[in-house]
Amino acid sequence: MQILILGAGYAGLRAALDLDRLLAGNTSAAQVTLVDQNSYHQLVQLLHLTATKASYAAETARPLDRIVQNRSIRCIQGRVVRLDPAARCVHLADGAQLPYDRVVLALGGETSYADIPGAREHTLPLRSYKQAIALREHLISSFLQAATTSDDTARRILMTTAIVGGGYTGCQFAGELAAWADELCTETGAPRTDVRIALLDRSDSLLKQFGPWATREAERVLDAVGVSVYLQTSVEWVEPHILHVNDKRLLRAHTIVWAGGVVAPALIAESGLPVDSAGRAIVDRYLRVQGQAAVFAVGDCAHVPDGDTGATVPATASYATRQGEQLAQTLFDEIEGRAPRPYEALKLGELVSLGPNDGVGNPLGIPLYGLPVILLKKGVEQWYLSTIE
């Protein structure tokens, strides 16, 4: 059986590694092929650190050839451009065609600009390793320019960062940027008093997934480190270094970071698969795409139902990893001729950092905040690395 796994993110890599372990190197039963446009596995949960700390660059991008060495997984670097479910074939940008018996869509998500004029052209996303590096270089360049600017207004704009989106990415990056500001100003010679960080969200609270206690704590912590939070503030259109918001105000910032949501890659819908409003493949209880015997989907590109509530499972790394684990077992059961068991969303909780020494979380449903969140988060990250290398 030829099994293609498209995407080496949290879900795809976990599925490949676990399936290889279950097969115990028996490539006569199945050949697992992992396809990704990059030569590395990127730790999306560390992108806010990569964008503010040079030392995290190597931590965030883990070479795939090193991960799969001594395993029977075949790796192909290439960009998927089309899926043909009828022919059971995947087409890559370089013209290569990959036939399959089973295919797993683990393509992750892309930044959603919600059709807001100018957002794609005039903002910086934070969804990938390369984007995090580009954002860091942009900030350093802006502060270096500010250090040599005599015009007070121009200098303040150069040192203003606006972050659109008060979810995980927006809050974590805001906290890290506030902590980095002192060092950044020292290194560039820019005046610390001109640093401005604004966090905008169209809802009435930050981190709505956590509940009122966490949103209040997040707002308190970010306010204490100098982040100005603007709630019920939606962006109507974007010009170079200017945000036009819903109350007709203008916010001028040389750096505009877009963390306003995620959509699935367009090729999923273009392949004729059933998708939701965010372009995610709709799957059944076994993570199989509805109406497709040979196509599965996991992670950010999948609309996965929670069997308990019926709601869509959150698109986070922890859920994606567990979906990868489940799918590996499902595929192995199919190879062995056993009936698969349905996916169950194991709710272990989430952890969000708000700078190097503060955060909020709900591990196992228990409210947690402050330094313990950071320590637990680092422990989880180290544990994860130990499972892939």
Image (cartoon, grey):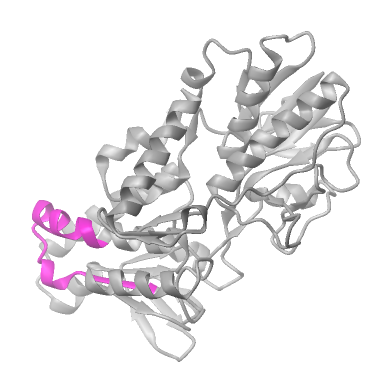
Q: Quadrant of residue 255?
A: bottom left
Taking depth in this image into account, of 60 and 306 the one nearest to the observer is 306
Instruction: Please tell me whether residue 326 belongs to the stretch shown in magenta.
Output: no
Given residues 181 and 362, the one toward you in this image is: 362
Frontmost residue, 164 versus 334: 334
Find residue 321 and report its image quarter.
top right
Asked whether residue 354 is in view, the answer is: no
Residue 9: x and y in percent read: 56, 38
Residue at position x 26%, y 41% in the image: 54
In the shown orientation, is residue 339 left or right of residue 150?
right
Q: Is residue 188 left or right of residue 106?
A: left
The outermost residue toward the bottom is: 247
| Residue 338 on image: x %, y % | 86, 25
Q: Main secondary structure of the magenta part?
A: helix
Residue lying at 37% horizontally and 39% vertically, measured from the top left:
379
Residue 380, image x, y percentages: 42, 40
Residue lying at 30% horizontally and 61% vertically, measured from the top left: 175
Q: Is residue 167 above or below residue 315?
A: below
| Residue 369 sits in quarter | bottom left
Could one spot residue 175 in this view of the protein? yes
Total residue callouts: 0
Examine the structure image and report whether residue 184 is included in the region drawn in magenta.
yes
Q: Is residue 211 left or right of residue 336?
A: left
Q: Residue at x 70, y 20 (%)?
A: 32
Q: Which residues are magenta?
A: 178-199
Considering only vertical position in the picture, is 209 above or below 6?
Answer: below
